Amino acid sequence: MTDLRVVGGDLLPPESDRRHLLSIADLTGDDVERLLSTAHSFALSQERDTKKLPTLRGRLILNVFYESSTRTSSSFELAAKRLSADTMTLKSTGSSVDKGESLKDTALTLSAYDPDVIVLRHPQAGAAQFVSQVTEARVVNAGDGKHQHPTQALLDLFTIKEAFGRLDGLHVAIVGDVVHSRVARSLVQALRLVGAEAILVGPPALLPTGLAPATHDISAIADADVVYVLRMQKERMLPGANFVPSLREYTERWGITPARVREGQRVMHPGPMNRGVEIDARVADSDASLVVEQVRAGLVVRMAVLYDLLTSGPVAVETTMEVA
Ligand code: NCD
């Protein structure tokens, strides 16, 4: 039997404030610090031969995905399993599923199983918040349209902190299709909470206004510690809309090639990557790349999020979790 001590629970806010994880905007800097520290403890537990912890035994976690997902859905499922919860993943193609009654009916149907947590990915902004209002379960937003993807931002912070040993004062250049990106929206807010800075770089039509300083000049990435590359999210563009002249020109002007990455810089991408478009394969596979580390962080950060939502105050101050 080995003990895993999760520290930092003294920062826990009142339970009423932390029922759901819908947006980074709902978190404080202390919340982020606590979640990253819990994730770090779980990362240590995952280095052992026996990786399963009994912490959430008897709890039910439902993963409901109305949009495609590889990393997010698999890591939530594995996170629940590593914490000994019962888990079920429901997938839908999404195209025929509307907001309003149908989403409400799905939520009510699933609520009949008395889940402790519903993890939801949905193409419409606000879907997770909507479900949180019609279910007793805690809701985790696993991506709602182009609005928010809070667990991605948390796993990105975790990855950056592991790589640089700190977050405060770091500069992150977010490059590409920012306007359609829930990842970028959550990440900019999360970086602000920990004292890091973001700059947005890409074609003018793909840069939102008012989120963070922005430029179309790719040479601006030279000052960044981290180059965070985004996919062209065609599924969120109106049919026929031309945001860039052509993918070839996009790659020429904004693609992350070896020549554009300077010594000491690290490169991140939330996946799925379009190699040869927004990121050159030689960069994706280089030592500068943190892409695999991001996937690994996704597991332990999602374990931390589930743990944090389902355990309260005194339990987390110094919790002993016996390895099953
Ligand atoms: C992102 C998403 O779905 O928002 N991917 C992910 O969760 N790992 C980014 C994307 O689809 O480009």
Image (spheres, helix red, strand yellow):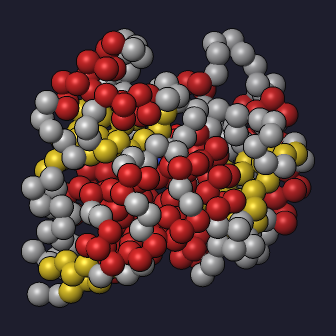
Return the x and y of residue 143 as percentages of the image width and height.
Answer: 47, 38
Where residue 190 appears, as percent x and y from the top left, is: 61, 57
Task: Using the image, determine if residue 169 lies above or below residue 246.
Answer: below
Residue located farthest toward the bottom when viewing the structure as drawn:
2
Depth order, front residue of 242/12: 12
Residue at 75 percent of width and 62 percent of height? 197
Q: How many marks?
A: 0
In the shown orientation, is residue 226 left or right of residue 322? right
Image point 26% across, 45% down: which residue?
117
Q: Is residue 262 left or right of residue 158?
A: right
Q: Is residue 92 visible?
A: yes
Comparing 37 with 260, the one in front is 37
Q: Quadrant of residue 30?
A: bottom right
Residue at 75% x, 57% y is: 198
The quadrant where residue 237 appears: top right
Q: Is residue 122 visible?
A: no
Side of 54 where 207 appears, left or right: right
**Residue 103: % across, % down:** 33, 20
Give coordinates of residue 123: x percent, y percent.
47, 26
The reply, left or right, for residue 297 in relation to residue 265 is: left
**Which one is in front, 25 or 216?**
25
Where's the N terminus, which quadrant?
Answer: bottom left
Q: Is residue 144 above or below residue 162?
A: above
Quarter occupied by the C terminus: bottom left
Q: Which residue is found at the position 69% from the left and 74% from the top?
A: 168
